[in-house]
Amino acid sequence: MNLRAFFKRYFDKGSIFLQELNLFSTNEEEDLHEIRNQVLSTRIYLVLLILSVSALLIYTSSIPITEDVIVKQPTFDQYKELISKNINPQCQCKRISINFNEFINLQAHYHPICSSDFISNEWIDFLSSLTLLPNIYYSDFRRTAVYSFQFLRSLCQLAETTINEIIQLQLQAQEHISALVKTNEIFEKEIQSFLDTLISTEQVNFVQVLTILRNLTLAQQLVSTLTTNVLFYIPTSELIPHEDSLAKYKIRSYYNAKTQEKCGCRYSSCIEEYKIQPIENSTNMFIVPDFYTGCFIVDSLLESSLICFYNETCIDQLLFHLNSSSFNSKINLKPLSKKIRKTNQTVNELISDLMVEKWNRTINFNKYYQLCEPLQCVYTHNHRFAIDYIVATFLTIIGGLITVLRVLVPQFVQIIRNKRNHDTMSKFFTRGKVLYHRTKFTSKMLRGC
């Protein structure tokens, strides 16, 4: 037996099996008409079942399926991989409150003046020795500049204390609270906003304290111990004291070259550029540009800028005149670094920034993620041709589909077949009746003839 004959044999058997297949047989005595109905119902039933199952499989395979995916205790690398695939997982934190200082490193880079020679002990001691010179004019650099630089040093120290003891302590005390891991972008924005608010709040507080002190000093008309706003003196006619002798006073006045106005210290705080004058007369020898003295050292310094101290030529001229006045020591100064935002800022503007030129903010998202200790990450995944979904849908529907087809198909076939048989019998009897009348009519005609 060759292969062709083998296949033909089994093909014929299969054809006969399919032709005689009857899924609706009741195993009772049935007539040929009923058997024919059952075989026809079987064929229709199988065709409809195959088409329905095919349509169901095609439909369930083509529609997008959304399912929740759970990743237990994901590592940071797993989290980054999900983010790189544009997946936004919802990761539940085990630790919902974390101190800011555990993942934030905030470093202040102070203005160059705070680490310069101009607030060093050597420079301040040198200026202090110049105050002992006799007959120095009250607006002379040598008379009160030492107090300006001492105050400048105090501002740097106070700013550093504020940053170390207030801002850093607040980072340790305050907590970031979140039940879910935030994305790096959202987390970065929130922390930057928090740091901006924290820094700006302390900047405002720092300036407000100085502003209150300045306003109180002016409102109470206090007298400076340096006699920069009031000069006390005894008239020459009363040099020999007696019981009725009283000291007189004179309100100091200053000339602002920029506004070209003379100002008295009675009701306002006046300023004038520092100058170095010969002791013999009041002719200006050297003016320190944009660096002021005035009624109060605090007010005049805040209105000053440090522009001279960035310029080596200006420093050389200043030192030349100062060194020529000193008999005990000489000093050298290095100019301030110009690698800053602006060189013409006033000291008041500097303290508004807490004497900080730049903030270095390091926000460690990886550290935050590790401290959060995510228990699990959940995300939705859209895909097609999900085997488990197809099988579940198929098993859910197929039982009902089979039941419906087994009930409806035999009845439908029986109705159609009975109607066709009825129509056939009706046509048969109609033709018989017509033939009968024709025969009868023909017989009458023959008899008549």
Image: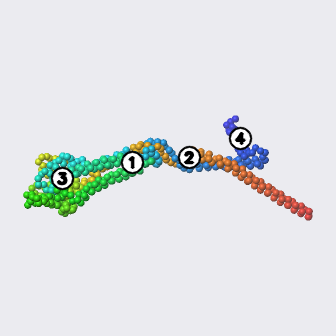
- Left of 123 or right of it: where is 160? right
The quadrant the C terminus occupies is bottom right
Front of the two marks 4 and 1:
1
| Alpha-carbon span between mark 1 and mark 2 | 46 Å
- Left of 90 or right of it: where is 159? left
| Alpha-carbon span between mark 4 and mark 2 | 37 Å
Q: Circle 4: is it few (<14), some (14-19), or many (20+) Cα within 10 Å?
A: few
Front of the two marks 3 and 4:
3
Amino acid type of the residue that numbered disc 1 sits on in the rendered structure:
Glu
Q: Circle 3: is it few (<14), some (14-19), or many (20+) Cα within 10 Å?
A: many
Task: Please tell me the numbered disc located at residue 391.
Answer: none
Task: Please tell me the numbered disc located at residue 175.
Answer: 1
| Alpha-carbon span between mark 4 and mark 1 | 82 Å
Q: In the structure shown, which secondary structural element does the residue marked by tag 4 occupy? A: helix
Q: Residue at x 51, y 45 (%)?
A: 69
Instruction: State yes or no: discs 2 and 3 in contact (Cβ < 8 Å).
Output: no
Please say whether residue 257 is visible from this viewpoint.
no
Nearer to the camera, 258 or 17: 258
Q: Residue at x 35, y 53 (%)?
A: 197
Amino acid type of the residue that numbered disc 2 sits on in the rendered structure:
Phe
Return the x and y of residue 363 as percentages of the image width and height: 37, 47
Front of the two marks 1 and 3:
1
Q: Quadrant of residue 210?
A: bottom left
Earlier in the chain: of badge 4 and badge 1, it is 4
Q: In the structure shown, which secondary structural element does the residue marked by tag 3 occupy? A: helix
On the image, numbered disc 4 is attached to which residue? 13
Q: Residue at x 17, y 59 (%)?
A: 230
On the image, numbered disc 2 is attached to which residue? 385
Amino acid type of the residue that numbered disc 4 sits on in the rendered structure:
Lys
Amino acid type of the residue that numbered disc 3 sits on in the rendered structure:
Ala
Instruction: State yes or no: discs 1 and 3 in contact (Cβ < 8 Å).
Output: no
Q: In the structure shown, which secondary structural element does the residue marked by tag 1 occupy? A: strand
